[in-house]
Image: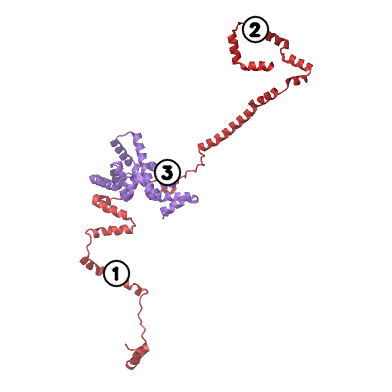
Amino acid sequence: MKPQNTILEELKEIAPTLVETGVSMPYFVQDGYFEQLADSILEKASVEFLPNSLNSSYQVPDTYFSGLAYKILLRVKEMSVEEASLYDENESIAPILNTLPKAMPYIVPANYFEQLTFQTPVEKAKVVPMKKMRNWMTYAAAAVFVGIMVTGSFLFSDKQQAQDFEKFQNMDVAAALDQVSDSELNSYINENHANSVDELTDIERANLDNVDDKIQSMSTENLSEYLNENGFLELKSDSKK
Amino acid sequence: MFPSDKELLSQFSTSSTKEKGFTAIIQKYQEKLYWHIRRMVIEHADADDILQNVFIKVWKGLESFREDSQLYTWLYRIATNETLSFLEKQKRHATLSMSDMEDSWENKIKADAHFDSNQLEWKLQLAIKQLPERQRLVFNLRYFDAMPYEEMSKVLDTSEGSLKASYHHAAKKIEAILTSY
């Protein structure tokens, strides 16, 4: 190929007017023509030439073209693959089902679905299980019971009595009585209707009379046995000696 | 366009968006579930009662819903169980024989204000009502909702093979009934 300058020099020699006209084209091409050119050629080629070439080397299922329109329709209507599968299934079992309208004949009240609202169940307050409540109450009741028992034991126990008894046992009664005046003793006796010493001695004497009779009637063996069993009396009597 | 089930469940599990998520679940599935129920019970008032119960059960049970199964399948399962127990109660109260029940269904359909015996849709409904209850359920789920057998087996707790056979028998019967009209 000759360089551009050489071509122009040659053209000047042959036809100088052409050089003055220039090389720009007066024709116009549609916008985007070249971008779509490849696709449009392929499209034409597939329509005109591909079926023949396919027929020669590939097999097509017998019912492919009969069901193609329906399958494309499904895709256009954005139907699911499962609906297509159902169509095939119905075709093989009961083709009449594919010819029936699927619209439900039942009427729904106007705006039913728009107005269908649900009152969400109100959240119930947390229920404290009775078991926990019972435990709490059990502890409270136990505490109250223990309190009552402790207080009661202090109030009603004989500890104080025992302490008082011990105190009086160790007390020198004779010395204490010496400190009490006769008038106080008399007034105590009068107020408490206490038996006089004479009355007490009369009773003891009457009892002793009976005791003497009973001792008289007892055998020596019984008496010795009694004394053996109550040896402390001997000790006491010994200590008095 | 409704949000995905995963998104709806996520909304429901967040306390601030719980009601919003639940409302969206209702809006997404209400029509499908309503028609699934109504095809079985025929009357709108009954379908409405059952649908309300279904969504109340959904509200109570959604927190314990295991996401390894599909929400759609789970909802259908609840709706189916509610519908079947409703039909069971109705049978007990009616104390009718099977043939009386079938007549009763037919009368219910014919009592509809819009019933037209010449319309194919009504003929199909009358034919479906002649199927045994279980077969009717399978036929409805497959024919109207195009439910895959795999999912149907989860809804009805039945093997896929048994469901296929059931649909086959139902479709054949309906074809025979329709061609005899």
Q: Would you identify the image quadrant in which residue A192 lies?
A: top right
Q: Position of residue A225 (x, y in %)?
A: 58, 12
SS assignment at label 2: helix
- Chain holding disc 1: A
Circle 3 crowding by C-alpha within 10 Å: few under 14, some 14–19, many from 20: some
- Chain holding disc 3: B
In percent of the image, x 29 and y 54: which residue is there?
A: A85
Drawn side of residue A130 relative to residue A180, left or right: left
Q: Position of residue A239 (x, y in %)?
A: 68, 18
SS assignment at label 3: helix
Q: Which disc, if any, is residue A212?
A: 2
Quadrant (top left/top right/bottom left/bottom right) for the N terminus of chain A: bottom left
C-alpha separation, residue under disc 2 versus residue under disc 1: 155 Å
Depth-wise, is mark 3 or mark 2 nearer the camera? Answer: 2
**What residue type is disc 1 on?**
Glu
Q: Would you identify the image quadrant in which residue A30 lies?
A: bottom left
Circle 1 crowding by C-alpha within 10 Å: few under 14, some 14–19, many from 20: few
- Lower position in the chain sequence, tag 2 or tag 1: 1
Drawn side of residue A26 relative to residue A151, left or right: left
C-alpha separation, residue under disc 3 versus residue under disc 1: 56 Å
Tag 2–tag 1 contact (CB < 8 Å): no
Quadrant (top left/top right/bottom left/bottom right) for the C terminus of chain A: top right
Depth-wise, is mark 2 or mark 1 nearer the camera? Answer: 2
**What residue type is disc 2 on?**
Asp
User: In the rendered image, what is the letter of the chain coloured purple?
Assistant: B
C-alpha separation, residue under disc 3 versus residue under disc 2: 102 Å
